[in-house]
Amino acid sequence: MRLKKFFLGLLAILVVQAISCRQAKVKAPSSLPTVASGMARTLWWVYPDGREEAIQAPPSVYYFPKISPDGKKIVVTTAAGRDRDLWILDLVQGTSSRFTSYVGDENQPIWSPDGQRIAFSSTASLETNFTGGIAGIVWKDANGTGEAKFLGSSRGKWLFPLSWNRDGKAILTMESAPDFQNFDIGMISLEGNRPYTLLFKGKLHEIQPQFSPDGRWVAYCADESGTGVKNIYVHPFPDVDKGGPWQISTDGGDSPRWSPDGKKLYYLIGANVAEAVMAVEVETEPAFSHGVPKVILRGRYLGSLPNNGIPYDIHPDGQRFLMIKQGT
């Protein structure tokens, strides 16, 4: 009898362990999606002197990397199947966690200035469908809790967040027609009823707007000359019609980023492959002025075209760039 009880007890333990293992397998967090090596992209710290340091994250199809204000995390879009999702890479812990898992695509994530929220474009927003937009902008607590909340959309358009003003009161946006043949720059105010307005509207493909750290200027990329060559420009903000634009690049360029101290503007040379990072010294007080573009970094990194957005970022310490390489 005792032997029978022993085996029954042992069987019960094994059953419980099997159930626990099965539950753990179901509840285990998904890992970053991986793809064939030729399609995979990797993340790198790149220093102005050319040094490279691999970021400890598995190869995947990365888009739109954005470093948190404290420099400890990266939010990035990944894609391996039909849908695009957002993931957060913890640079301190060396871990990754899924931030969104909606049916549809999430793109162009940006951090709030205090690092407490992440805004992004989503095709899954019900409110977007209610207002006739293709993809609208939502935000969600950066710790992953709670549901995403609707911020804005544009009827019949794709709408993407590109830059969050340091005072937290406005988000610069980029909108596009369904066929991606024309782009305009707008703004969502985060005060009151969160109105959405267009700032630059034309036939020149105004894209990639970025607030200066002091919030008084907007850098962006556009074909202002109508020749098909895109350059970097700066306008005052919020009165975009009062002064400017100042042309920053001299022979094409895209993907503007301000240095954390606002004393430089960076941009990329190259379309599908970014072969150089350019830097231009700027003054924003009392008026805007700028110097001559200089090459500060050469390499072969992911470029902004055809649909990679701004494919790099600058660490808050101002000493290194977050770049993406195609292939492993």
Image (spheres, rainbow, N blue to C red):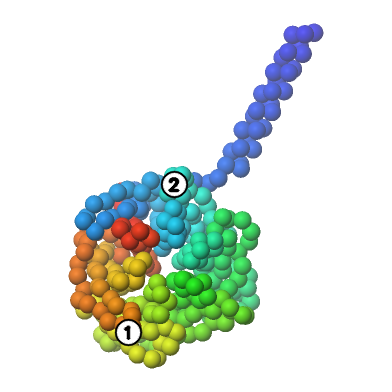
For residue 212, which quarter of the picture? bottom left
Q: Look at the numbered disc 2 and give the secondary structure of its residue.
A: loop
Q: Look at the numbered disc 1 and give the secondary structure of its residue.
A: loop
- Mark closer to the chain start, 2 or 1: 2
In this rendering, the answer to whether 20 lies above or below 38 is: above
What is the residue that sits farthest to the front in this orientation? 286
- Residue 136 coordinates in the image, percent (x, y): 55, 73
Q: What's the residue type where badge 2 is placed?
A: Val
Q: Which residue is mark 1?
A: 287
**Residue drawn at point x = 45 percent, y = 54 percent:** 73
Q: Is residue 112 left or right of residue 272?
A: right
Q: What's the residue type where badge 1 is placed?
A: Ala
Give the CA distance from mark 2 to mark 1. 40 Å
In this rendering, the answer to whether 14 lies above or below 41 is: above
Q: Is residue 317 visible?
A: yes
For residue 4, which quarter of the picture? top right
Give the number of the mark in front: 2 or 1. 1
In this rendering, the answer to whether 301 lies above or below 241 is: above
Q: Is residue 74 visible?
A: no
- Residue 109 coordinates in the image, percent (x, y): 47, 64
**Residue drawn at point x = 49 percent, y = 55 percent:** 87
Q: Is residue 325 left or right of residue 237?
A: left
Query: Quick one: 83 or 239, which is closer to the camera?
Result: 239
Q: Which residue is mark 2?
A: 92
